[in-house]
Image: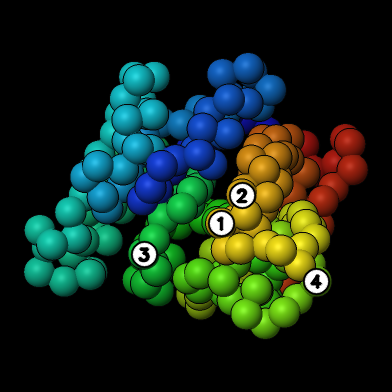
Amino acid sequence: MSHLRCVVLASGRGSNLQSLLDVICQKQVDASIVAVLSNKEKAQALERARKLGIPDFWINPQGYPDKKAFEGALLEIIRTYQADIILLAGFMLVLSPFFIQQARVPIINIHPALLPAFPGLHAQRQALEYGVRYSGCTVHFVDEGVDSGPIILQAVVPVLPEDTEETLSQRILVEEHRLYPRVLQLLCAGRIACRGRKVMILGEGEGNE
């Protein structure tokens, strides 16, 4: 597979962005992050990009008449940088069907729960309130629903009796930082194939023709 040009959308501190940057800088994957976009002016993710000379953009949703116009501005930048894939790394806005359809490239997201359980916001809090014994994180393709796309990889962590939302989040985050770069490696190697809702991880030598 050829070099993968990635655009990252992030709203916060950008720790998952950093985990991706680390494997790229260490040349463990044949990919580059060509731009980082955020809906938050002070997002630390933008600063992480800036320090590495990666183009960073704050796109203020309040500066557009409606969501479609805002998403159109995102898409214009994504197309300008000729993205092969869009990676969501803590992007706290739900993308509309318009965006999904117009992106015309795969969109990947990481979510701090074992989907399909606990989609949406505050997944760790949802897990604790439900009383599950295990939680974790999921990397999945984005479709027109909320955290409902085909699942690529998942990682499991135990939920401990003394866990708070913060401690569970931190333990899940460790797995997020391991899982997302692994998915990027598989994507770069051409080893991920989506057939309907089933995602296949191809063996060595498959899918690279």
Residue 71 x/y as whole percent: 27, 61
Q: Is residue 82 visible?
A: yes
Whole-number angstrom distance, CA of label 1 to CA of label 3 = 22 Å
Residue at image mark 4: 133
Cα separation between marks 1 and 2: 6 Å
Q: Label 3, on which residue?
A: 93
Mark 1 and mark 2 in contact? Answer it, CB < 8 Å: yes
Badge 2: few (under 14), some or many (20 or more) residues near its Cα, within 10 Å?
Answer: few
Q: CA distance from mark 2 to mark 3?
A: 22 Å
Q: Residue shown at 40%/74% (left/top)?
A: 97
Is tag 1's residue or tag 3's residue first in the polypeptide sequence? 3
Tell me the amino acid under the disc marked 4.
Answer: Arg
Instruction: Give the residue type that dot 2 points to.
Output: Gln
Q: Quadrant of the C terminus?
A: top right
> Can you give x and y, in whole percent of width and height, for residue 136 in the image?
71, 60
Q: Amino acid at mark 1?
A: Glu
* Image vertical order of residue 184 relative to residue 28, above or below: below
